[in-house]
Image (cartoon, rainbow, N blue to C red):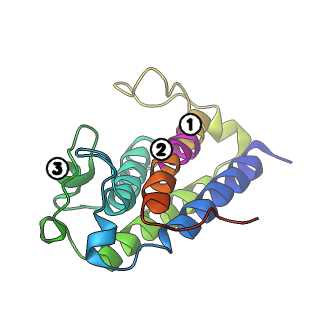
Amino acid sequence: MSLSERLQRQLASTRQLSEKLLAAFQEPAQWVHQVHPGCNHALWFAGHMANTDNFLLSLVAPQRTAPLEGYRERFGMGSQPVNRPEEYPPPQEVLETMRERRRTLLNVLDEMSDEDLSRATPPGSPDFLPDFASVFEMANWHEAMHAGQLSVARRALGHKPLSG
């Protein structure tokens, strides 16, 4: 199995888990439920994944980035989630943006060879992203980390653990 195929599989598996977790959030108040003031909530998670994938695209395929108006401020690194649904775009809009940005990231990965994945990231990239493969690895572990937070919010709303 090539590195590209392995990364594709890992990203698909992590996103499948995230989608299962997100399916539990239905009402506006659930989307912004925080288990503690300042904690990340489901809507922030979805917007953050979209914003992150868009940033990662800026490193590996800048021409494929999208203008995500207001996403950096609402969902970017260092943003502070609030529990007021009116402060955010509608959940379905944020989910579609999250899904579209991931489809684009996966399409870019699908076009890359293992040799492409070993290329250095552009100057100014974070030190922990030395090559293109590390960009896709980061997309995976970053989403998995935040999915753990999403799982806690989901359980706090009374949902049972996910089954196999």
Judging from the image, what secondary structure is the residue with disc 3 in?
helix
Judging from the image, what secondary structure is the residue with disc 2 in?
helix
Instruction: Return the residue nearer the eye: 30 or 1.
Output: 30
The residue drawn where x is 42% and y is 30% is 122
Task: Quote the CA–CA distance across marks 1 and 2.
Answer: 6 Å
Left or right, residue 108 beside residue 44: right
Residues rendered magenta in the picture = 138-146
Foreground label between 3 and 1: 3
Q: Which residue position is annotated with label 2?
A: 60
Residue 37 place in picture, x, y as percent: 23, 46
Residue 111 place in picture, x, y as percent: 63, 57
Above or below for 22 versus 51 = below
Instruction: Kindly identify the amino acid type of the residue bearing the numbered disc 1.
Output: Phe
The residue drawn where x is 51% and y is 55% is 151
Q: Residue furthest top?
A: 127
Q: Few, some or many C-alpha atoms within 10 Å of disc 1 (few <14, some 14-19, many ≥20)? A: many
Q: Which residue position is annotated with label 3?
A: 73
**Residue 28 among magenta residues:** no
Quarter of the image with the C terminus in it: bottom right
Foreground label between 2 and 3: 3
Instruction: Kindly identify the amino acid type of the residue bearing the numbered disc 3.
Output: Glu
Judging from the image, what secondary structure is the residue with disc 1 in?
helix
- Image marks 1 and 2: residues in contact by CB distance under 8 Å: yes
Q: Few, some or many C-alpha atoms within 10 Å of disc 2 (few <14, some 14-19, many ≥20)? A: many
Q: Which residue position is annotated with label 1?
A: 132
Residue 31 place in picture, x, y as percent: 32, 68
